[in-house]
Image (cartoon, grey):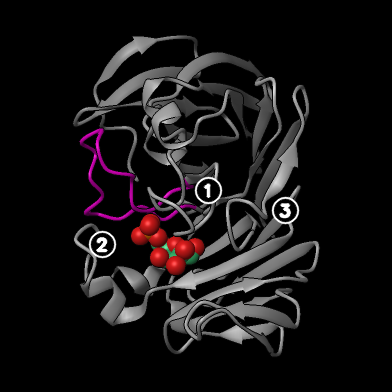
Amino acid sequence: MNLHTLPALTVLSDNVTIVEKDGVKIVRVIHEKATAGIALHGGHVVSFQPKGQDDLIWMSEQANFNGEAALRGGIPICWPWFGRIAAPAHGFARNSQWTLVEHRENEQGVIVSLGLEQNESTLAVWPHKFQARLNVEIAETLKVTLEVVNTDDKAWTFSGALHTYLNVGDIRETKTTGMGAEYIDGLQDAKVCQGGDSLVLTDTIDRVYTQPESVIAVNDEKLQRTLLVENQGHNSAVLWNPWAEGAQGMGDMQDDGYLTMLCVESTLHAPSIETGKTLQPGECHQLTTSLAVK
Ligand code: TA6
């Protein structure tokens, strides 16, 4: 996504500016090491481009920057649940307005922190108090950490994902390794399956891999690079591509959009709200994903 042409609203420092795309404010970072954008709507990373590289992040040309829909592409924050186990799908965080808490920078890069707490509309769908902090570290690599704290006086359970859309040259010439052998297949009623951990996709895929390696490698023949994805605080990694028919069925993805994207997600998966991870009052959890080019 080209951040350079967006009108600047506020200059916060030499490297950090608030810009706007349609109705959505974006924290834009232009640093010696990389450029990046984080939309306050959704706390959504929309771009990460290390110096001399194509963007590592895919954004749909048809994403709705209207401040109402979740953005298609980028790194959606799925929380406090992952998937369609409750409504709205993937939780409310990706469709909430986050606040810029702080930004810090030095010659290595910039850290941008956003915050979200319960409000009337989150309490209406999930009756719990929480404090969420999204730390986005922009340097030669990108590190995104979602930290959630239980600020309520009783325990609650949650799941979630950092639903990264990677930008690839051509999905048909992209090989993913390190997913691990076992997966829950979203296309076969959550059947548990075994398979090789190295894949070149030829069709739609929607899998929760339960034993991923610590580093997942996405080898992109066309762009001549390998993207490395390293996750923490997760219990699985999701691989998703809607392929041609899926893309055609989505109003916010161009028909051929599936050819240049691959979701590799840092996921805390649970089959229901009740079976998610439990946090007692005062406890916190961090879910992280890091992206690098080899
Ligand atoms: O992470 C994979 C997935 O849960 C798929 O099942 C697919 O629907 C995708 O997310 C996108 O979901 P969304 O609600 O953004 O359309």
Which residue has dot 3 on it? 234
Quarter of the image for residue 124 reads top left
Where is residue 225 shown, x and y percent of the image? 59, 66
Image check: 31 left or right of 194? left
Q: Residue at x 36, y 27 (%)?
A: 121
Range drawn in magenta:
57-76
Spatial separation of the CA atoms under disc 1 and disc 2: 27 Å
- Counting residues from the start of the chain, the first of labels 2 and 3 encountered is 3
Where is residue 262 shown, x and y percent of the image? 48, 67
What secondary structure is marked by label 3?
Answer: loop
- Residue 100 visible in this rendered orientation of the protein: yes
User: Which quadrant of the render holds ligand 1?
Assistant: bottom left
Spatial separation of the CA atoms under disc 2 and disc 3: 28 Å
Which residue has dot 2 on it? 253
The total number of labels drawn is 3
What secondary structure is marked by label 2?
Answer: loop
Image check: 210 left or right of 222? right
118 w.r.t. 290: above or below:
above
Question: At label 1, which amino acid type do we have?
Answer: Gly
Q: Residue at x 21, y 54 (%)?
A: 62
Residue 52 is labelled as 1
Q: Nearer the viewer, mark 3 or mark 1?
A: 3
